[in-house]
Image (cartoon, rainbow, N blue to C red):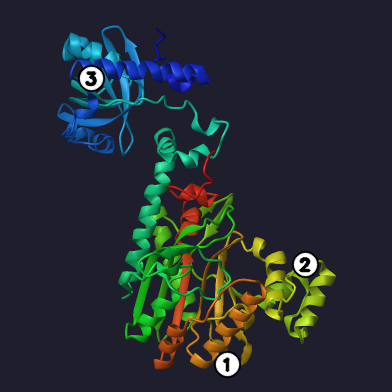
Amino acid sequence: MSVEPQNPQTTEWTDQQLSEQEGIRRAKLQKLEEAGQSPYAITHFDVTHESEEIFAQFDRLEGQTVRVAGRMVSKRVMGKASFAHLLDATGQLQFYVRREDVGEEAYAAFKDYDIGDYIGVTGIVFRTQKGEISVHAHALILLTKSLKVLPEKFHGLKDPDLRYRQRYVDMIVNPEVRDTFRKRSQIISAVREFLDNRGFLEVDTPVLQTVEIGASARTFKTHHNALDLDMFLRIETELYLKRLIVGGFRRVYEVGRLFRNEGMDATHNPEFTSVETYEAFVDYNTLMEMVEQLYSTVAQKVCGSTCVPNMGNQIELKAPWKRITMAQAVNDACGVDYADWITDEDARACLARMEVHFEKNAKRGDCLAALFDEYVEANLIQPTFITDYPVDISPLAKRKPENPDLTERFEFFINGHEMGNAFSELNDPIDQRRRFEEQVRVRAAEGIRAEVDEDFVTALEYGLPPTGGLGFGIDRMVMLLTDNASIRDVLLFPTMKPQK
C-alpha cells in the first residue's frame, strides 16, 4: 500500500493518486472504528490557548502546560521524534512529539495521522534551538479524520472558480483569505460604531416585498403559497427607511442584504450587502461631510491609516475630498456642455456623433450619464464626489431650487469605481407620484412589469421632513480596504453557476 508523503504541500497529485490516498484514509478510519476509536464520536476538547495568544504571551507561558487544537498541516517524522504544525483560527503553531513522552501506542497512532486531520495536543510551551515557539507534547488525541487530501497549491488548480466554490478549502490553505474576512467583520463593526455614535438607530426592514417598483434594477421574483401572492426580494431598503422618518425617527440605518437580478462582474454580485442611512433635517452637503468622516474613521480603525493601498494606487481617505458636478466633470473630460442640449433629441444626436452608446429613448440626463461613464468614471482615482445629477436619472432625489432640471444628489468614486449614492430626499408627494408613474411607463415600454408604490406615496402625503439619505456597498468598501480587485474575494460564498 502506498503512503502519503510527509509534506504533500510540495507534491502535485494526479487524480489517480488522489483517489488512492482517499482510499487509504477511509481504510484508516474503518480500522479506528473497528477498534472502537471513531474520531467522529469525540464531542469535546478543552482548548486553553490559541496560537496567537501563545506567541504574544510566550514570556508568561514558557514552561506552562497548554491544550491546543487545530488542523495538522505539516508533519516531519524523524524516527523516535517528530515535528508538526497545527493550524487554528489564529495561525500556525509547531508542536514536538517524542515516543518516550507520549508512549509507544500514542506515537504509533500519531505517525498514522494524515495532513488535514484535526488533533488536540496537551504539552509544555518552549522555544526550539532554532528559536521557534512550540509545544512539547505529552498527550495527543485525534479529534476528526480528514478524508480528503488538501491541495498543495490551491491557486494553481486548473479551475480557478473552485476557490469560490470550496471556500472552506481556500481558507485552509490560504491564510490571507481568512484575514480578509476577519477584516470584513471589523469594517462592518466599525461602520456600525460610527453610526451609533452619531445617534443613528439600527433597524430591520422587510426583505420580501409585495410591490415591484419601477426602479432600474431587476428583481428576483418568488411566490407566497399561503397568500397565493407573488413577492419580490428587495433591491433597496430606501422606501421603508424613509417611512420610519415619516413616523418620527430622526436618524435610522440598516445593514442588510439586497438582491438584484443583474449581471456579474468584478464589482457586482446578485446578492450583496448595503448600508443605508436616513437623517431628518439635513441635506446632501451634510452627507458628503459624513461620508468623508466615515471612510477616514473606518480606515484608521481597521487599517491603521487613512491612506490605503488599492490596486497599485495609494488612496488618501482623509477629508476634504474633491467635489465637482457631473456636468462640469463631463465638460472637462470631453468638451460637451450639458446646457447646450435643449431637447432629448439634441443629446442623442451628440452621442451619436461621438459614437457613444445610448438607449433608443434616452433622455438628456441619460445621455449625460453615458458620457460620464465613457469619459470620466475610470479616471476618478482619489475620492471624489460627483454632484448635481439630472432629474431624469434621479427619481427619488429633491430638485435643486435654482435649477429644477438637476437634483441635490451625489455619488462618490474611488479608484475608478462608484462606491455610494446619496441625495436630499424628494418629499413632495405629487412630484414623487409623477416620477413613479414615468418610471412605470418607461419600464412598460421595455416590456417590464412595474408599479407605483402607493403606500410610500401615502406616507409622503402625511409629511416627510427635509431628509438626507445615503447608501453604499459594504462589499466595495471591503474591496477598497483589503486591496482586493474582485467582489468574489470579499464574499464568503459568492453566487456561482452550478457545476454539471
Real-space Cα separation, disc 3 to disc 1, in angstroms: 78 Å
Q: Quadrant of residue 44?
A: top left
With 277 as the anchor, is 53 left or right in this view?
left
Residue 246 image-quadrant placement: bottom left
Residue 10 at what x, y percent from top left? 48, 20
Given residues 301 and 492, the one toward you in this image is: 492
Q: Please tell me which residue is depicted at 51% across the width and 82% down the height of the picture.
A: 452
Whichever of labels 2 and 3 marks the residue nearer the N terminus, that label is 3
Instruction: Locate residue 261: give its quadrant.
Output: bottom right
Q: Secondary structure at mark 2?
A: loop
Which tag is nearer the camera, tag 3 or tag 1?
3
Q: Are the residues flagged by discs 1 and 2 in contact, CB closer than 8 Å? A: no
Rendered location of residue 300, percent (x, y): 40, 59
Query: Few, some or many C-alpha atoms within 10 Å of disc 2 (few <14, some 14-19, many ≥20)?
Result: some
Q: Is residue 259 left or right of residue 25?
A: right
Say which label, 3 or 1, has the lower sequence index.
3
Residue underneath mark 3: 33
Residue 325: tell me if it is visible: no
Q: Is residue 177 depicted above or below 214 in this figure?
A: above
- Amino acid type shown at disc 3: Glu
Residue 500: x and y in percent read: 54, 38
CA gap between label 2 and label 3 equals: 69 Å
- Is there a contact, CB below 8 Å, between mark 2 and mark 3? no
Question: CA–CA distance between discs 1 and 2?
Answer: 31 Å
Circle 1 residue: 401
